[in-house]
Image (cartoon, coloured by chain):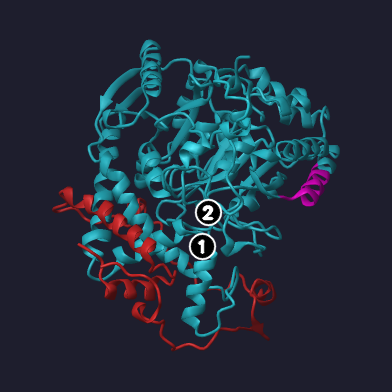
Chain colours: A cyan, B red
């Protein structure tokens, strides 16, 4: 079905008109979560509190006083956001059993609008990784592994081999959130994005993944990785929904001094019909080594789509693109070394039994609590921050960062409105293949197309575009100007309408059949 | 350019992750090697960038008013070892053993 106006008000209208109640919606989502448990998308399912929230929402609908579009709508949150009274683990032994005493600002905002928090989703440990495979609760499975579309294209293995070993990764690190949205267990999910952690899994799971401009959405309560690059990410099934979520979350937070003070006005996306005034930039350096020919072709096709519709499509250059990953490597490890220092076992989280001295307790606690990836990054980060290395590595990386950011400034100043690039190098890899390379190598490979937007703080969005030859989702990325989310999303929405990305055909979802799940493209009015 | 034992000990003192074994060292070496690519870039006359929001002056000081607090109970709940309103730590001022004093392997 095409994205017609009539379909856009599915859930919101259905709730207002009483065709479905928040409790029913919540129960269906919870049931679907149970039957898709094999995806391992959720770490914690907050069944009791969710149902309570749903009941409260129901009361408000009965009185004709819903709080807004999100009232009664089930959502999921990545497990690196603090959620009061609910375990927040970051998929790490360091925080296993840690019950947050407060809500992250974005979580609070969602709850204040009546959203129903279904649970916390799985991720790579402390959001370090690009597969959602390196957390203590195990890897997340891409729902598309079980789709009719993928199974049809799979070469049947010999009967002795477990069909299960075919499954593909979600990408990461917000893989749980992407899988949750992709498998219809929630209507939207929060992720985080430091190097591509929202857009990467969005591309592999066939959902919309929005990385907002740095400074637009509060990071208070998001357990930090890289303070100068982290942003909360939004995962939804369509661009309109992303705009709704953005509207509920953006704005200055006195508790996060890195949020800008300008007033944010939530917006509805216009239905763009005339793209002749649009200028789309195609950065040639994004034709990265390792980019699959399939995605290259798709990218080209997308550029033609804009051209044929009358838009101006120009090749541009972002000359420092290839240093982005190295720059990120240094800045990320440096900031991680600093941010992870708070985990010492004294105030919260895991504490070792070692009692010989404070330092040996810290050391043992952190060895026991962190996986090798995290410890490796902390060690490297400390190296780059040593007095003798500070100028050579850390400050140098900061200078290179400016060069990367300036590349974008120059391009946007030349009249380009939005950049169009691939999001990932290929479709999702099978898990068995993915784990053959170590985390750092994978991250370096996979972040190449998404990372620079974090360097420059720019908004970027993955829009599911087509299925690959293997029947798996492939997405394309749009990068916009700072704080111009409305323009970015408007273009993304136009593109989404043109490509008509197919809906995932999952057995489990069919069994829980409901008109709301099957036919909705946009959940919110 | 190999990382010396002294540097490794110093790093452990700072990082406190107990990663001075062969694997930790190898990871570190690879990370340094990877980072060395930065030196290919000419950054003459370029100022380091702390924040992408540097033009917006958004880092501000607010009024020094107490707006929240009084949450001792909540904060103590997550601590494993406490006495009254204190977090309890093992004795301090005891240095970590140097690498040579441990039985772990060290490459050349």
Q: Is residue A392 above or below residue A62?
A: below
How crowded pointer 1 is (Cα within 10 Å; few <14, some 14-19, many 20+) is rated as many
Q: Quick one: quadrant of the N terminus of chain A? A: top right
Image mark 2: chain: A
In the rendered image, residue A78, in percent from the top left (x then y), is placed at 59, 48
Q: Residue furthest front?
A: A160
Q: Is residue A355 above or below residue A306?
A: below
In this view, the residue in front, B58 or A220, is A220
Splitting the image into 4 quarters, where does residue A442 fall? top left
Task: Identify the residue at horizontal 42%, vertical 56% (top origin).
Answer: A226
In this view, the residue in front, A273 or A179, is A179
Task: Check whether the beta carbons of the residues at disc 2 and disc 1 lie within 8 A of each other.
Answer: yes
The tag on residue A35 is none
Q: Secondary structure at mark 1?
A: loop
Splitting the image into 4 quarters, where does residue A319 fall? top left
Task: Identify the residue at horizontal 42%, vertical 48% (top origin).
Answer: A438
In the rendered image, residue A286, in percent from the top left (x then y), is placed at 31, 31
How crowded pointer 2 is (Cα within 10 Å; few <14, some 14-19, many 20+) is rated as many
Query: What residue would you read off at disc 1?
Result: A370
Question: Over which residues does the magenta segment extend?
Answer: A45-57
Q: Quick one: quadrant of the C terminus of chain A? A: top right
In the rendered image, residue A87, in percent from the top left (x then y), is placed at 67, 58
Q: Secondary structure at mark 2?
A: helix
The tag on residue A125 is 2
Q: Is residue A397 above or below residue B101?
A: above
In the rendered image, residue A397, in percent from the top left (x then y), is placed at 27, 54
Alpha-carbon span between mark 2 and mark 1: 8 Å
């Amino acid at each position: 079905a095409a994205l017609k106006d009539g379909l856009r008000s599915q859930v919101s209208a259905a709730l207002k008109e009483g065709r479905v109640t928040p409790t029913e919606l919540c129960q269906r989502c919870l049931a679907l979560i149970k039957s898709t448990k094999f995806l391992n998308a959720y770490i914690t399912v907050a069944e009791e509190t969710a149902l309570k929230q749903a009941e409260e929402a129901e009361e408000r609908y009965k009185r004709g006083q819903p709080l807004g579009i999100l009232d009664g709508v089930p959502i999921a949150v990545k497990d690196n956001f603090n959620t009061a009274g609910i375990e927040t683990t970051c998929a790490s032994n360091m925080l296993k059993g840690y019950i947050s005493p407060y809500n992250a600002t974005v979580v609070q905002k969602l709850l204040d609008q009546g959203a129903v928090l279904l649970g916390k989703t799985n991720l790579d440990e402390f959001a370090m990784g690009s597969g959602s495979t390196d957390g203590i609760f195990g890897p997340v499975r891409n729902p598309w592994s079980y789709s009719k579309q993928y199974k049809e294209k799979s070469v049947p293995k010999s009967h002795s081999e477990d069909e299960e070993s075919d499954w593909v990764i979600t990408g990461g690190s917000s893989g749980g959130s992407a899988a949750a949205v992709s498998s219809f267990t929630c209507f939207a999910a929060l992720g985080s994005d430091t190097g591509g952690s929202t857009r990467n899994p969005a591309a592999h799971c066939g959902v919309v993944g929005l990385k907002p401009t740095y400074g637009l959405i509060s990071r208070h309560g998001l357990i930090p990785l890289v303070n100068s690059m982290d942003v909360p990410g939004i995962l939804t099934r369509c661009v309109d929904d992303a705009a709704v979520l953005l509207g509920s979350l953006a704005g200055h937070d006195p508790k996060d001094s890195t949020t800008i003070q300008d007033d944010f006005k939530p917006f509805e996306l216009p239905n763009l019909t005339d793209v002749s005034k649009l200028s789309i930039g195609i950065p040639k350096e994004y034709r990265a080594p390792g980019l699959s020919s399939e995605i290259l072709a798709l990218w080209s096709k997308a550029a033609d789509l804009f051209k044929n519709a009358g838009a101006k499509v120009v090749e541009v250059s972002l000359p420092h693109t290839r240093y982005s990953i190295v720059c990120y490597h240094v800045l990320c490890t440096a900031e991680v070394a600093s941010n992870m220092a708070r985990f010492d076992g004294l105030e919260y989280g895991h504490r070792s039994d070692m009692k010989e001295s404070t330092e040996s307790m810290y050391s043992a606690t952190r060895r026991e609590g962190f996986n090798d990836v995290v410890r490796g990054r902390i060690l490297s980060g400390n190296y780059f921050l040593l007095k003798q290395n500070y100028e050579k590595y850390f400050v140098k990386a900061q200078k290179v960062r400016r060069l990367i950011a300036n590349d974008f400034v120059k391009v946007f100043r030349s009249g380009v409105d939005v950049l169009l690039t691939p999001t990932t190098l290929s479709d999702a890899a099978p898990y068995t293949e993915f784990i053959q390379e170590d985390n750092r190598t994978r991250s370096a490979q996979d972040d190449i197309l998404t990372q620079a937007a974090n360097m420059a703080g720019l908004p970027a969005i993955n829009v599911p575009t087509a299925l690959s030859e293997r029947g798996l989702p492939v997405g394309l990325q749009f990068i916009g100007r700072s704080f111009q989310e409305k323009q970015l999303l408007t273009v993304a929405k136009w593109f989404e309408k043109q490509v008509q990305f197919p809906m995932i055909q999952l057995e489990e979802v069919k069994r829980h059949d409901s008109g709301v799940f099957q036919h909705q493209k946009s959940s919110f009015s | 350019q190999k990382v010396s034992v002294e540097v490794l000990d110093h790093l452990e003192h700072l990082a406190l992750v107990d990663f001075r074994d062969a694997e930790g060292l190898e990871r570190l070496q690879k990370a340094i090697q990877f980072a060395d690519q930065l030196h290919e870039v000419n950054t003459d006359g370029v100022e380091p960038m702390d924040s992408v929001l540097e033009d917006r002056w958004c880092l501000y000081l607010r009024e020094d008013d107490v707006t929240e607090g009084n949450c001792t109970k909540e904060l103590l709940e997550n601590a494993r070892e406490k006495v009254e309103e204190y977090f309890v730590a093992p004795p301090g001022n005891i240095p970590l053993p140097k690498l040579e004093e441990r039985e772990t392997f060290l490459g050349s």
